[in-house]
Image (spheres, grey):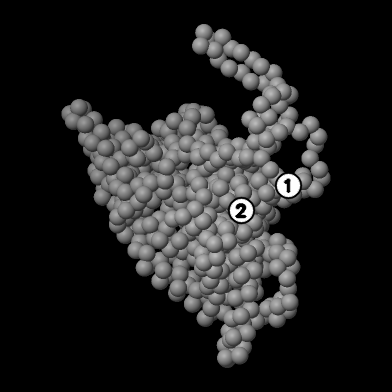
Amino acid sequence: MRFMTIYKPGHESTTPPTQEHMAAMGKLIEDMARSGKLIATDGLQHSSKGARVSLNSDGSFKVTDGPFTEAKEIIGGFAIIDAKSKDEAIELTKTFLRVAGGGESEIRLMHDQPAFDSKSAARSANAGQPQPESAAR
Amino acid sequence: MSDVNRAIDAVWRIESARLIAGLARITGDIGIAEDLAQDALVAALERWPQTGVPDNPGSWLMATAKHRAIDLHRRSKRIERKHEQIGRDLDAQQEMTVSDLDAALDDDIGDDLLRLMFTACHPVLSTEARVALTLRMLGGLTTDEIARAFVVPEATVAQRIVRAKRTLSEARVPFEVPRGADRDERLSSVLGVIYLVFNEGYSATAGDDWTRPALCEDALRLGRILAGLAPNEPEVHGLVALMEIQASRLRARTGPSGEPILLLDQDRGRWDRLLIGRGLAALARAEELGGASGPYALQAAIVACHARARKAEETDWERIVALYDALAELTPSPIVELNRAVAVSMAYGPALALELVDELRSEAVLKNYHLLPSVRGDLLMKLGRLREAKQEFDQAASLTRNARERELLLSRSRKAADGATNEA
């Protein structure tokens, strides 16, 4: 199951993070990547470099340049993780928040194909040799 | 399940491989290591509902398991010097504090995980046993989950795991990363096990479902872990590339009611660009490391040709034929030849491909392989030989043990039959 976690630090700081903090976060990301569970992640720059675009009911667009003022809603970064369950995603997120030192993460299940339940029938194991996918399949 | 129990379950999935790997280094026996890890889990199930989940649950489990290992060692020393191997590193570590343990864990855990992979995939074990041990110890799957994934009774899987652990112990298989010439062979066993798991998820050989995406994800995770542990092995990146790119098509491979959709009919907009990007990057890494001509890298290069084509008609079939040529030379097999024939039909027409496929009909390995008549039926169809095509599809349908695939083949058979009737 693939989850997107959206991190909201709760405030938007104007000073860059400390060396120690960067190093700790770097190590966490490396560990997560090595566990095979981190598919993609990135941090986001200050909201003053962004914008919000909305489509009005009359078909016109409204474009608002950053910075955004509702500090609680500011998104600081995201990750796409591959976990066996929502509980696992929650535990992984706790580890992240511990290193981040605060804030809130929203965990959302992505629209992957659902895993099917299988029943029925016995099988004998296939030979261990690589089987290139037939172009016909 | 209570919240705490669910959290414990999740922590176990995250930490169990590292725990078992670390304990196996100390005890030299993965069976004993798993027992100790399980003991720690039981302790957590007793304690955490009262105390709450500790801040660093992984080191709590490790510290608990190590204390048990020390107890076990002392006891066995007193009673009889039986489990001597447990003591190997323990004496020196008895005075260690928990923070020392953490540090040791952080330093060595990568190597330990790699040792665990090599041990679980040791050639002294049957292929089924390697798969079961790997999924259990490295994938964190329960016996029940493995049984369901491979459509076998749970007791069979449990038996397999017990026997495998005994075999490793009796054969005194050392807990180590093999070196020298041995290493290549052992690495290819690890890669073979991971790809077998992936393939079973990608096109289930039996059962009612065409694919089992969860199994693909397990294999992908194992592959990515291995790539982190052995970053300089080109074939590891080749396998990861192959799996990432194939997995990128999972969503598009199955229709709304679970029916298979063949590669050339898939909606390429539903392919997962994120996984394709990761796969192409892994392939580039394999090539940088000088591994472009390894068997997995070649297969990855073939699937990359599909991934790069935005439309089916843009597929570079001539390159695919050339890649299959190289693969056939490297790992000669009738299955590779069959796949090559399909590429030949797309690049140079069905008549030439049919000649190649007909040469394969005497191959014993393909005797009951449903894709042989399936491919043959497809070629005959293209050549307008519809009656023969129908026979081939019927034959293929009778050979496959996957219900979804059978339906697909029977529907192609009906199409061929309709065409033949209209002609007459």
Name the residue: 57% across, 44% down.
Answer: A81
Quick check: B336 left or right of B387? right
Q: Are marks 1 and 2 in contact (CB under 8 Å)?
A: no
Amino acid type, residue under disc 2 in the picture: Ser
Relative image position of residue B15 (x, y in whole percent): 58, 60
Q: Secondary structure at mark 1?
A: helix
Question: Would you say residue B143 is visible in this rendering?
Answer: yes
Q: Nearer the viewer, residue B87 or B222?
A: B87
Query: N-terminal of the two: label 1 or label 2?
Result: 1
Residue at the far front: name it. B50
Amino acid type, residue under disc 1 in the picture: Gly
Relative image position of residue B267 (x, y in whole percent): 44, 30
- Chain containing mark 1: A
Distance from Cα at disc 1 to Cα at disc 2: 14 Å
In the picture of the structure, the residue carrying the numbered disc 1 is A26
Please tell me in which quadrant of the rendered image residue B64 appears.
bottom right
Name the residue: 36% across, 49% down.
Answer: A117
- Chain containing mark 2: A
Quick check: B393 left or right of B94? left
Category of crowding for the residue at label 2, using alpha-carbon neighbours closer than 10 angstroms: few (below 14), some (14–19), many (at least 20)? many
Residue B385's place in the image compared with B334, above or below, is: above
Name the residue: 52% across, 50% down.
Answer: A87
In the picture of the structure, the residue carrying the numbered disc 2 is A35
Q: Nearer the viewer, residue B95 or B187?
A: B95
